[in-house]
Image (cartoon, rainbow, N blue to C red):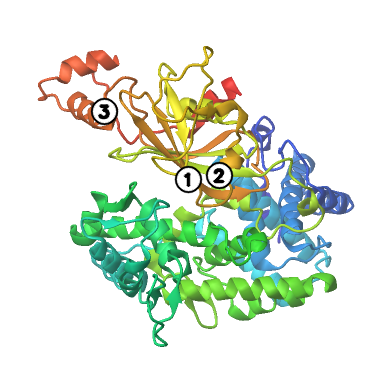
């Protein structure tokens, strides 16, 4: 790099960054980041000398750059177990850079980080310190040149497809075709068991909708060599994943005794072109989340590692430089000798899972992995900043061996029957008592704790948990509720997919469905923490979901006969509207911080 091109890196206002968090401003330092810092410190004098072109502030700018370089290379070393800071594999370096970028919400900081790592690689190249191959260097440089040319900090360029192109591509996916068949089979509703699964006698028809031939092993059924028996819905290939995605996408609702379609299912099946494109994309996103990030029952201990590798490949496969199949198959060759066997097993398992996604049309695999253009947005939405940050993609080394104090549960809490949907995603420690979870729900939904509540597992007849009555009395029918303060969330929700219901205000009956989406070893910061959500919190005493829907319609329709009455009741000012989809995750976390 010429002296003039180095000047290009220093036009960023380094002084303005000193008061910001920055990529290297994390409150904690991992062992990998520490090792990276020590190794780069040894190169600091040479880098400053190379960088300095005699202008005012050159040395300071060089040191600012190296602070961000340490953060990125530290994350790279975590993901690859590498020990050198003078050679990098292009894809892991790109992912490490992306991982650090998601920790900053400031565009100028992000641009500075990319420039810093680019300058560092230039330094290694121009001073003869690069210890990798010329091909590796070219690939790394191509990555940064692509970012510079596009003036785009993201790895992914969103394709521009017409509505007709998107609809044709999405409707042609086997995943969408099989899901459509299953929704049509469900029709107005189908019976389910107490656990929300399809009955054994219905499995043959349901499985056929998703291209699988099986029979439910009901009592008295005769063996049929042509159709293998299954003992539960979980034994049917693909069906549990599609079922979970349908529920997550709010296309079906599982009630106590039957599954019924949500209103949105109509748009999925017979909506306009725009409605179907939106519905297909939203569903494909939920399917990727459920399938890639969920616990693999066959390999529960490897699920996080498998998910990290899959997410890395899918994100890279969405870029203009997709990863090669050969490179993924050779992962074991790049691992330390003592880790080659386990790395080979993990890469083969991940490849098998990716091949199943390819069978559904979500990925193509030939010499390279590629995500179809119509699905790139789904990958971006499914594996957002929060997912990338928490997966610690391919984390290895000393940090991975540090045990967490307690598992962290990622819960999705959804207000039943709310239209549009109202839900929150929260991280809570598994050892949190239910009375504390009650406080979390009250906070993120904006409730005021004016009314009674309880938790219930196992359906309508299952045990319930509530505050202890100081007089030892109970207003409930049947068995009295157990003391919620003596039971932890983890005791009731032991695995991914576990569910319970939280009911608040037995007059309005605000029922919140709680489900475990993921089990993590680290919450990545403040706990409890809200990481996402949708829908404005209903007003207290607004008459349940039906009453709240009516109020929203009234306050936003000047012609409604109760327009002024409800606006006054909610305290809305002149010109102020009520957005039923609005939700501010930062505000929610601020409220949580006030009480925890």
Q: Residue at x 28, y 32 (%)?
A: 545
Asked if residue 389 lies left or right of residue 33, the reply is: left
Q: Position of residue 546 (x, y in %)?
A: 23, 32
The answer to whether residue 573 is visible is: no
Residue at which label 1 appears: 499
First reached walking from the N terminus: tag 1 or tag 2: 2
First reached walking from the N terminus: tag 1 or tag 3: 1
Alpha carbon of mark 1 to alpha carbon of mark 2: how far? 7 Å
Query: Residue reaching furthest bottom?
Result: 225
The answer to whether residue 309 is visible is: yes
Is 550 located above or below residue 60 in the figure?
A: above
| Mark in the foreground, 1 or 3 | 1
Quarter holding the N terminus? bottom right
Alpha carbon of mark 3 to alpha carbon of mark 2: how far? 30 Å
- Viewer-closest of 258 and 129: 258
First reached walking from the N terminus: tag 3 or tag 2: 2
Q: Are marks 1 and 2 in contact (CB under 8 Å)?
A: yes
Q: Residue at x 47, y 25 (%)?
A: 442
Q: Position of residue 160 (x, y in %)?
A: 35, 62
Asked if residue 376 lies left or right of residue 56, the reply is: left
Total of numbered circles in the picture? 3
Alpha carbon of mark 1 to alpha carbon of mark 3: how far? 25 Å
């Amino acid at each position: 790099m010429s002296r003039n091109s180095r000047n290009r890196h220093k036009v960023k206002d380094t002084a303005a960054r000193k008061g910001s968090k920055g990529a290297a401003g994390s409150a904690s330092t991992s062992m990998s980041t520490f090792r990276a810092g020590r190794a780069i410190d040894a190169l600091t004098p040479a880098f400053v000398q190379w960088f300095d072109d005699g202008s005012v502030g050159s040395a300071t700018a060089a040191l600012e750059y190296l602070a961000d370089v340490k953060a990125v290379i530290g994350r790279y070393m975590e993901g690859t177990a590498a020990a050198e800071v003078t050679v990098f594999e292009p894809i892991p370096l790109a992912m490490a850079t992306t991982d650090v970028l998601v920790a900053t919400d400031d565009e100028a900081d992000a641009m500075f980080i990319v420039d810093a790592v680019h300058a560092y690689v230039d330094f290694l190249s121009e001073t003869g310190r690069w210890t990798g191959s010329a091909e590796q260097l070219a690939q790394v440089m191509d990555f940064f040149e692509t970012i510079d040319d596009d003036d785009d900090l993201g790895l992914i360029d969103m394709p521009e497809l017409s509505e007709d192109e998107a609809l044709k591509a999405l409707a042609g996916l086997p995943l969408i075709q099989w899901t459509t068949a299953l929704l049509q089979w469900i029709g107005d509703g189908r019976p389910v068991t107490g656990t929300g699964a399809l009955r054994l006698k219905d499995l043959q028809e349901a499985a056929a909708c998703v291209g699988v031939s099986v029979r439910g092993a009901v009592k008295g059924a005769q063996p049929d060599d042509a159709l293998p028996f299954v003992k539960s819905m979980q034994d049917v290939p693909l069906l549990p994943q599609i079922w979970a995605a349908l529920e997550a996408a709010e296309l079906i609702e599982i009630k106590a005794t039957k599954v019924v379609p949500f209103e949105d299912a109509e748009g999925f099946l017979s909506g306009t072109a725009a409605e179907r494109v939106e519905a297909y994309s939203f569903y494909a996103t939920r399917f990727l989340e459920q399938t890639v990030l969920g616990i693999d029952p066959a390999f529960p201990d490897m699920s996080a590692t498998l998910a990290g590798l899959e997410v890395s490949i899918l994100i890279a496969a969405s870029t203009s430089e997709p990863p090669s199949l050969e490179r993924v198959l050779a992962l074991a060759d790049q691992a330390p000798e003592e880790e080659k066997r386990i790395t080979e097993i993990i890469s083969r398992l991940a490849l098998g899972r990716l091949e199943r996604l390819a069978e559904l049309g979500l990925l193509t695999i030939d010499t390279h992995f590629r995500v179809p253009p119509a699905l790139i947005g789904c990958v971006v939405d499914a594996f957002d900043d929060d997912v990338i940050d928490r997966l610690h993609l391919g984390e290895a080394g000393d940090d991975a061996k540090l045990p967490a104090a307690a598992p962290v549960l990622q819960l999705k809490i959804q207000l039943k029957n709310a239209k549009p949907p109202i839900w929150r995603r929260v991280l809570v420690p598994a050892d949190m008592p239910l009375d504390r979870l009650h406080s979390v729900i009250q906070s993120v939904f904006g409730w005021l704790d004016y009314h009674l509540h309880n938790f219930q597992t196992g359906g309508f007849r299952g045990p319930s948990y509530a505050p202890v009555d100081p007089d030892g009395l109970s207003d409930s029918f049947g068995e009295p509720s157990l003391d919620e303060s003596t039971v932890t969330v983890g005791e009731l929700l032991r695995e991914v997919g576990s569910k319970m219901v939280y009911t608040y205000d037995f007059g309005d009956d605000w029922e919140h469905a709680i489900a475990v989406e993921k089990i993590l070893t680290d919450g990545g910061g403040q706990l409890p923490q809200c990481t996402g959500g949708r829908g404005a919190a209903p007003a207290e005493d607004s008459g349940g979901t039906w009453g709240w829907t009516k109020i929203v319609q009234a306050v936003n329709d000047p012609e409604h006969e109760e327009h002024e009455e409800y606006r006054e009741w909610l305290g809305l000012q002149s010109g102020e509207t009520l957005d039923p989809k609005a939700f501010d995750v930062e505000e929610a976390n601020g409220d949580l911080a006030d009480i925890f």
